[in-house]
Amino acid sequence: MGGGQVLRYGASLTMSAALARLPAMSAELPYEYEDSVLHERRERVFLVLAGLFLGTLAMLNILGITRFIDFSFTIFGTRIPFVVAVGVLPYPMTFLCTDFISELYGRRRANFVVWIGLLLNVWVVFILWLGSALPGPDMVDGEVVRDVAGRLPVFFEVKKLAFGAVSASMIAYLAAQFCDVYLFHFWKGLTKGKHLWLRNNGSTLVSQLVDTVAVILITHYYAHALPIEADKAVFPQLVAFIAAGYVFKMVAALLDTIPFYVGVHYLSKFLKIDPHREHAL
């Protein structure tokens, strides 16, 4: 066998090994070339979903509790408090992404992305710490110089708030995301792949309740970063923060049911994946 033939044979074995790791296809393709194109297509879609998940996660952890948005309203003369952190706004997107990955690529890939998200949190914390540890014109003798109003430079204000948000979210994130992935596949197995709306909403609504309660309690008791009014009882204010955050996430989760259905319908055809019979693990 010539050198060229050996190379081609080795490449063929490598390609076959790679293709063997692909999820089962709903339609047989006659040519290895078409298999490789399908493999690339699947990996690109996975990269988009994982990138959107990780990018959103990094953004919400940095923005976190840098600002609170007041959606409070009045009903029959009674003011209903509804205040959410700006970091909550993009958070439902992370659950939508993991649901897509769970449905199309299986539990192992979804859990893998969750673990990468945890490492991303650690990376964000490290960069914030490194940025504050290195010398700069806003420091004198190792001490940060405040302005005439006693405020820290913008970076250090962001770092202070982001540290509180990331510390809270790292614990809540793991609990909520693994809960989401587990419940998604629990409902999928229980319904034998039917009732897509149930596993989409059922997993997200429960996991976001876990996340919201954990984030609010940790942010308050560990980071002391919630805008709590000192002259009022703490517990009712914490309940109001939890309720506002969860209602916002719940509404967002219900609204994403339609794009989830549409996305799964078209992506399963585009990627030639049958979610009803694949990813049994």
Image (cartoon, grey):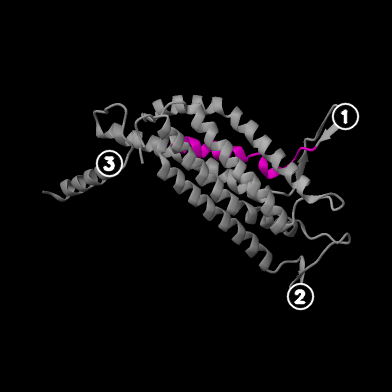
Residue pictured at 47% horizontal, 27% vertical = 196
Q: Is residue 82 magenta?
A: yes
Give the numbered dot on residue 20.
Answer: 3
Q: Earlier in the sequence, mark 1 or mark 3?
A: 3
Q: Which residue ends up furthest to the bottom in the rendered image?
A: 141
Residue 247 placement, left or right of 34: right
Residue pictured at 39% horizontal, 36% vertical = 42
- Residue holding disc 2: 141
Q: Is residue 202 magenta?
A: no
Q: Amino acid at mark 2?
A: Asp
C-alpha span from label 1 to label 3: 65 Å
- Residue holding disc 1: 77
- Span of residues in magenta: 81-102
C-alpha span from label 2 to label 3: 60 Å
Q: Main secondary structure of the magenta part?
A: helix
**Label 1 residue SS:** loop
**Label 2 residue SS:** loop
Q: Are marks 2 and 3 in contact (CB under 8 Å)?
A: no
Q: Earlier in the sequence, mark 2 or mark 3?
A: 3
